[in-house]
Structure formats: structure tokens, C-alpha cells
């Protein structure tokens, strides 16, 4: 087997993750869940992503999502399951994914040979995922796979979700090993210039400016941020280590696919992700500029 180039799996994941996460910024998701009484944007997000776990409580969602405020989660979970069962939410989620990808990519793309090829490659990579210690991945892996020959765009979205949650579960393990709590993880990532804009973190994760400042103070006390709340050399090294450790924990799917398959999947998914981004899949100010 040809060894994978350095960070090849990470690049492939990044392309696939854009296709997965576009759903959570799409108005289609809220439109699908609104008839069931799930119309608060926080409730929509929490229900749609946690539904594979079943009708779980707030504690399970906070633990598996990691960087959400438990107070925010507890406002909507488990009451959200009184409005709609997890099975109902999952069906709505898949319909919304269908609408979202059709709107962003176009009908020709979702039925293309390239989409089918990407779906098959991504599903093959997902066969290399491991369940143990990965609750969000494992819960999604219990869901039926959309048929590639009938709905290749949904098969690709499903596979992208499996791969995204697999990497995410591993990343949480790396964060805990580094002793970064939920908000410290996000703050340090934002300080790297690649993380989510603080405005979006606070509005979607349930934190405020006081919480943010307290996390910055804790990171400064550890020598990870300087007086200007920028990463110190130690902070930069820690963030590099976290990504490298996440790569290590997430290497099996991409090793199974092989270097040639990973390169091809990255090319295909990257093309779809660029089209989606150019079509307005994500807010222009979503990512911090440093």
C-alpha cells in the first residue's frame, strides 16, 4: 500500500466536512422541522445532529458535542423529543440534506457520474472507521445508507457525516488529553486564525463575552495566549500537536482507501465544496480572520 502523503486525510476530511456541515446553515433544515414545532435555530441544530443518538438527555448531548454550553443544550433537550421523535427528525434531516445539495450544487451535479464516484469512495473510506469510543460516529453508522445508484448525493452526505463524526470524536479525545475544556478549545482554535468567528461561537454555542474572556484568561495563565490574546509559541505548538494527534486517530479510513483513492476523493469533494461555498452555503464572516 502506498503511504499517504502528510495531512492527506485531513485535506480530504476538510472537503467532505464542507458538504456535511452545509446542512446546518441551510434554511431547508429549519423548514423541515418547523411543522413539528421545532423552530428555534438552536433546537433545530441540536435535534438534527443528536437524533442518531436517540431520545437522549442534555448530558449526553453536551458530552458528545463537547464545545456547547450545557445551559444552552438543557434549554432544548430532552424537551425537543416531545415535539418530534428522533426518527421523525432523522427523516426531516435527510429531506433537508436532499434539498440543500440540490440547491447548492444543481440537479446535474447531484446525478452526475462524479457524484456517484465520490459517494462510493467516501463510503469505502467510512468502512475503515472504528466505533469504540466514538459515540456520534457509531450512532450515525447505525443509520441506513442511502442507495448510491438512486441518490448518490445523499450517499455522499451520509458518508461525509460518518467521516466527520469519526474525526470529531477523535478530536475530542485529543482535546481532553491536552486538558482544554469546551470553550478553551474553541478560543485557542480561533486564536490560530482558522477557527470560527467568536460572534458565531457565542451565538450558536451558548456563551457570552464574559465566558470568552474567562477562557482567554485561563489560556493566558497556561502560557498559551499572550497579553494580546494571540497564540504564544507554546500555543501554536499545542494547536499543531492537536491537529497531528487528530490525524493519527483518524488515519484508518484514509489508509483503507489508499493514497490514490484519497487524492481522487479530495479532488471530487473539493470541487463540490467549492461550488457549494460559492453558492452561499456559509456566512461570509463565519471564520475568524485572526
Image (spheres, rainbow, N blue to C red):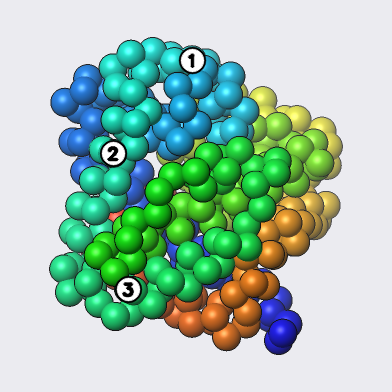
Q: Residue 80: tell me if it is visible.
A: yes
Q: Would you place residue 220 above or below residue 233 in this image? A: above
Rounded to the nearest angstrom, the CA distance separating label 3 from label 1 is 39 Å
The percent coordinates of residue 224 (x first, y second) are: 78, 44
**Element class at badge 2:** helix
Check disc 1: other Cα within 10 Å, few if <14, some if 14-19, many if 20+. Answer: some
Does residue 6 sit above or below 192 in this rendering? below
Residue found at x 66% / y 53%: 130
Q: Is residue 9 left or right of residue 114?
A: right
Residue lying at 20% horizontally and 27% vertically, measured from the top left? 34
Q: Position of residue 162 (x, y in %)?
A: 51, 53
Q: Earlier in the sequence, mark 3 or mark 2?
A: 2
Foreground residue among 258 and 204: 258
Residue 190 in view of the camera: no
Observer-side mark, 3 or 1, equals 3
Image marks 3 and 2: residues in contact by CB distance under 8 Å: no
Is 202 on the left or on the right of 64, as rendered?
left
- Image quadrant holding the C terminus, namely bottom right
Q: Which mark is residue 115?
A: 3
Q: Residues within 10 Å of mark 2 (few under 14, many from 20)?
A: some
> If the image is split into quadrants, where does the N terminus sit?
bottom right
The residue nearer to you, when weighing 178 against 190, is 178
Indicate the position of residue 44 as horizontal and vertical percent values.
Answer: 33, 30
Task: Give the labeled residue for mark 2.
Answer: 91
Assign a secondary structure to mark 1: helix
Mark toward the viewer: 3 or 2: 2
How many angstroms separate mark 2 from mark 1 (CA)? 23 Å
Q: Which mark is residue 74?
A: 1
Amino acid at each position: 500500500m502506498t503511504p499517504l502523503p502528510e495531512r492527506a486525510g485531513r485535506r480530504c476530511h476538510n472537503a467532505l466536512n464542507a458538504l456535511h456541515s452545509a446542512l446546518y446553515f441551510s434554511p431547508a433544515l429549519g423548514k423541515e422541522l418547523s411543522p413539528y414545532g421545532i423552530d428555534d435555530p438552536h433546537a433545530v441544530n441540536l435535534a438534527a445532529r443528536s437524533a442518531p443518538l436517540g431520545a437522549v438527555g442534555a448530558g449526553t448531548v453536551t458530552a458528545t458535542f463537547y464545545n456547547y454550553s450545557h445551559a444552552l443544550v438543557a434549554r432544548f433537550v430532552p424537551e425537543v423529543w416531545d415535539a418530534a421523535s428522533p426518527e421523525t427528525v432523522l427523516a426531516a434531516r435527510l429531506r433537508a440534506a436532499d434539498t440543500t445539495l440540490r440547491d447548492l450544487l444543481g440537479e446535474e451535479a447531484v446525478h452526475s457520474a462524479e457524484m456517484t464516484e465520490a459517494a462510493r469512495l467516501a463510503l469505502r473510506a467510512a468502512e475503515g472507521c472504528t466505533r469504540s469510543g466514538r459515540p456520534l460516529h457509531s450512532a450515525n453508522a447505525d443509520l441506513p445508507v442511502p442507495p448510491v445508484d438512486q441518490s448518490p448525493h445523499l450517499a455522499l452526505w451520509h458518508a461525509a457525516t460518518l467521516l466527520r463524526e469519526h474525526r470529531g470524536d477523535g478530536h475530542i479525545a485529543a482535546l481532553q488529553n491536552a486538558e482544554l475544556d469546551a470553550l478553551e478549545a474553541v478560543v485557542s482554535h480561533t486564536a490560530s486564525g482558522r477557527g470560527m468567528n467568536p460572534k458565531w461561537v457565542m451565538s450558536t454555542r451558548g456563551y457570552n463575552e464574559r465566558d470568552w474572556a474567562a477562557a482567554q484568561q485561563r489560556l493566558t495563565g497556561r502560557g498559551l495566549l499572550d497579553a494580546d490574546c494571540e497564540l504564544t509559541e507554546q500555543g501554536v505548538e499545542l494547536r499543531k500537536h492537536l491537529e497531528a494527534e487528530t490525524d493519527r486517530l483518524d488515519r484508518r479510513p484514509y489508509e483503507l482507501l489508499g493514497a490514490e483513492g484519497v487524492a481522487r476523493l479530495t479532488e471530487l469533494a473539493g470541487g463540490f465544496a467549492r461550488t457549494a461555498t460559492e453558492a452561499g452555503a456559509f456566512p461570509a464572516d463565519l471564520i475568524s480572520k485572526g
